[in-house]
Amino acid sequence: MKRLVFVLALCLLLAGCTQTVPSPGSAGPSRPVAAYIAPDVKSAEVTHFCAGELQTTSIDGPALDALRDWVDALEYEPYDSPDGLAPGDVDGGESFDIVLHEGDYPGFSYILNGEDRAYLLVEGHWYVVSNASRPPVG
């Protein structure tokens, strides 16, 4: 009986560790909230904002593959601001908004606030990136 209680408690604990959102057309959670570019995504739109200038680029093919590899290598965890401000609320820095044209994931934003401070905004959830780098987009 103790083993059953332990297994149930462990299952409940693990179930609470991953944030999920309903997939399109479904009422229940089906995938984790994550920065992810699925293999079926064939194109994306990247909007780069820096120093008051906005540049939008459509990417596909090898450029999209490079972005997909970069995203897969990101290491991040949920961000809890000690002062209640979101990382996007600070002056300076730059942002990359990535909109995916296919797949279940709508895209995400990547915010650079200096050389070693980077954040992800994925479906309304903030994450701090531990291996900050510039995305491979023109």
Image (cartoon, helix red, strand yellow):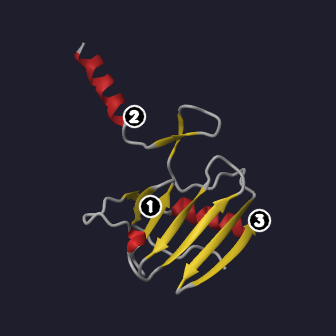
Which of these two is toward me, 92 or 103? 92
Please give left or right for residue 101 compared with residue 37 in the image: right
Please give left or right for residue 125 compared with residue 55 in the image: left
Position of residue 21 relative to residue 89, above or below, is above
Position of residue 120 relative to residue 111, above or below, is above
Q: Amino acid at mark 3?
A: Gly
Q: Residue furthest left?
A: 2
Q: Are marks 1 and 3 in contact (CB under 8 Å)?
A: no
Query: In x, y percent, where is residue 59?
Result: 73, 69
Q: Residue furthest top?
A: 1
Q: For residue 91, which quarter of the picture?
A: bottom left
Q: CA distance from mark 3 to mark 2?
A: 36 Å
Q: How many marks?
A: 3
Q: Amino acid at mark 1?
A: Glu
Of pointers 2 and 1, the one earlier in the residue sequence: 2
Query: Which residue occupies 73% across, 70% down?
Result: 58
Q: Please tell me whether mark 1 sits on a helix, a strand or a loop.
A: loop
Find residue 45 and name its label: none
Q: Please tell me whether mark 2 sits on a helix, a strand or a loop.
A: helix
Frontmost of labels 2 and 1 is: 2
Q: Amino acid at mark 2?
A: Ala
Residue occupied by mark 2: 15
Query: In x, y percent, where is residue 118?
Result: 43, 71
Of pointers 1 and 3, the one earlier in the residue sequence: 3
Q: Please tell me whether mark 3 sits on a helix, a strand or a loop.
A: helix
Query: Which residue occupies 42% across, 78% down?
Result: 113
Q: For residue 69, which quarter of the picture?
A: bottom right
Residue occupied by mark 1: 75
Residue occupied by mark 3: 61
Which of these two is toward me, 73 or 83? 83
Position of residue 74 relative to residue 111, above or below, is above
Query: In x, y percent, where is residue 42?
Result: 75, 57
